[in-house]
Image: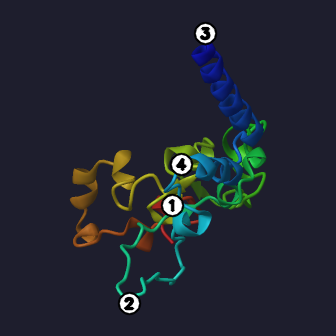
Amino acid sequence: MRRSKKITGILSVLLLCSVLTGCNRQARDKLLRVFIDGVPTEQEEKPVIAGEKEKKETKMKTALPQAPTQFFHQPFLENQCGSCHDTKFSQKIVSQGKELCFSCHDDFAKDKKVVHYPVSEGACGDCHDPHQSPNKFILKKPIPEICFTCHAEEEIRAIPVHEGQNMCTDCHDAHASNEEKLLK
């Protein structure tokens, strides 16, 4: 009986601590470090952001393994979940499609003659991850792989001007253009 009261007390304290820290990662990690050794500090865990050139070294001047480069959507990086979500703790999105994206980003397609289908449909999430990605522009897949999700690779590669080309965006705008076939 006494043992079950002790276990109940410990579980109550842990539940109270988790409720108090909520989704705040810094508070949760600080609390975890009280009970568990080895929980990394914010400095030890900071992601490598594209463009940063910092390299950490040990006292022996041996470089630590580099974390993979990540690209982040700025509101996600700054923990501004409420910019897109109903609340910081909700998965519900405040609006859908291009209304959501163009509430922060300029509507770069409004004055263009040719608009890429996903852009015209407000399907930004077909190509872009809303949080983070190892690919530039927070693309879900690297170029040209992302392009071949919809466009038939065999047909595209069969066009003579595409021979030896791998970066579709060297010639084509991925969103909108005043030229046919989204040419730049």
Q: CA distance from mark 1 to mark 4?
A: 47 Å
Q: CA distance from mark 3 to mark 1?
A: 67 Å
Residue 74 or residue 159, whichever sits in front = 74
Is residue 90 among what the camera can see? no
Residue pictured at 63% horizontal, 22% vertical: 6
Name the residue carrying label 1: 174
Residue 93 or residue 87, whichever sits in front = 87
75 up-or-down from 87: above or below: below
Residue pictured at 66% horizontal, 48% vertical: 31
**Front of the two marks 1 and 2:** 2
Residue pictured at 58% horizontal, 42% vertical: 123
Q: CA distance from mark 3 to mark 2?
A: 56 Å
Residue kind at label 3, given as amino acid type? Met
Disc number for residue 36: 4
Name the residue carrying label 2: 61
Name the residue carrying label 3: 1
- Label 3 environment density (alpha carbons within 10 Å; few <14, some 14–19, many ≥20): few
Q: Which type of secondary structure does the marked residue at label 3 adopt?
A: loop
N-terminal of the pair, mark 1 or mark 2, is 2
**Front of the two marks 3 and 2:** 3
N-terminal of the pair, mark 3 or mark 1, is 3
N-terminal of the pair, mark 1 or mark 4, is 4
N-terminal of the pair, mark 4 or mark 2, is 4
